[in-house]
Amino acid sequence: MDRRSLLKSLAAIPFVSVLGSCERDSDDRKHGATVEVHLDGAFALVIQENKENSLLAFSPRPKAGEDQHQFYFNGSHKPEEPGKAYQFKLSPQGIRREKKPEIDPGLNDFSFRTEKWRVGDSLVTIELPAPKRITFAGHRSPVTFVAGGRQAFMPTNHILEYEVEDPRRLKLECGSIGEPCAAAADSFPGVTRFFFEIGPKKTLDYELSHAHAIRFFNEILVDSFPELAEKYKLVVPQGGDRSAQVAPHVMPAVFQYDAQNPPLRNASYIIDCEFSGPLVDTSAAPMT
């Protein structure tokens, strides 16, 4: 995993929360409203068929001796307090009930099924209702499965899309971060966004980052989805000598580049991991 410069605008479109805004509520009823949950980095995503296809997203802690992770919420340039375990829950109230999410075909290479799984010691855990759609953004990176040498393409994130029926009832429970849990600042009328990002505590060069991400993906399979490990573990590439050190920082950004005299506001780096985790269907409860 490495940090790359993805800028978010905080100025061109003023943020208005869906929570308690009469003007926004009226606009949502007229044009429809959407919630996007962005999972950037090494999150495993489990579709629980025995719980109305609700989702559980979690990011296990790396093993001792591996490069450790830290958690960033809603594009903050500062990580949340290290050492804590963070739990979130998106309430189904106000969200359109879906039978089963539509899954983007670009996720097919890493969409699996198992009846044996566990969560274990995780840095972040998120309970979510069934979304309308599971998709991704940006490029997919080429990888190779150990078994058979099959090549595949792996996304760096998952994006969950929900249709909102009653914005006034929309709520994300944030546990130790505190309530109420506000939406990301780059939400805009009709679209409310929440960003959950996992990144390394230290900056790695490209090859080390790439290798670390694959090792961690393999660890997730072994520890959380043991039946999938033998078939779906990835080949870990050898590290190189490229050094692309990039530290997080704040710089001016603008949302609409063609705007005349656009206002600028500081926008933070966010974490861009090399790979996401697996997307897994199950009809079983997690093992203890």
Image (cartoon, helix red, strand yellow):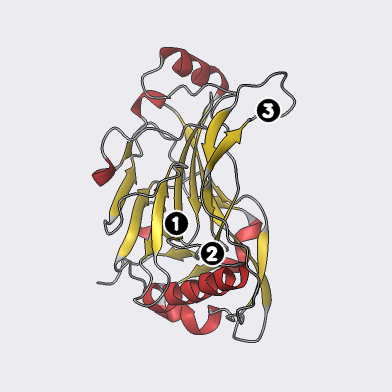
Name the residue type under label 1.
Answer: Ile
* Badge 3 element: loop
Quadrant in which the C terminus appears: bottom left
**Which mark sits nearer the N-terminus, 3 or 1?**
1
Q: Residues within 10 Å of mark 2 (few under 14, many from 20)?
A: many
Label number found at residue 1: 2
Q: Nearer the viewer, residue 118 or 165?
A: 118
Number of callouts in the render? Answer: 3
Q: Nearer the viewer, residue 276 or 26?
A: 276
Residue at 32% across, 47% down? 88
Residue at 39% across, 67% down? 68
Q: Are marks 3 and 2 in contact (CB under 8 Å)?
A: no
Query: Looking at the rendering, which quadrant does residue 239 occupy?
Result: bottom right
Residue on which disc 1 sits: 198
Q: Nearer the viewer, residue 57 or 249?
A: 249
- Please indicate whether residue 169 sits to the left or right of residue 242 in the image: left
Quadrant in which the N terminus appears: bottom right
Q: Residue 48: image x %, image y %?
A: 39, 58
Residue at 34% across, 28% down? 169
Query: Looking at the rendering, which quadrant does residue 103 occupy?
Result: bottom right
Name the residue type under label 2.
Answer: Met
Q: Is residue 1 above or below residue 129?
A: below
Residue at the right extreme? 258
Q: Is residue 81 above or below residue 243?
A: above
Q: Residues within 10 Å of mark 3 (few under 14, many from 20)?
A: few
Q: Residues within 10 Å of mark 1 (few under 14, many from 20)?
A: many
Whole-angstrom CA distance, mark 3 to mark 2, is 29 Å
Q: Are marks 2 and 1 in contact (CB under 8 Å)?
A: yes
Q: Residue 282: image x %, image y %?
A: 42, 65
Label number found at residue 256: 3
Query: Looking at the rendering, which quadrant does residue 143 occupy?
Result: bottom right
Q: Is residue 156 above or below residue 66?
A: above
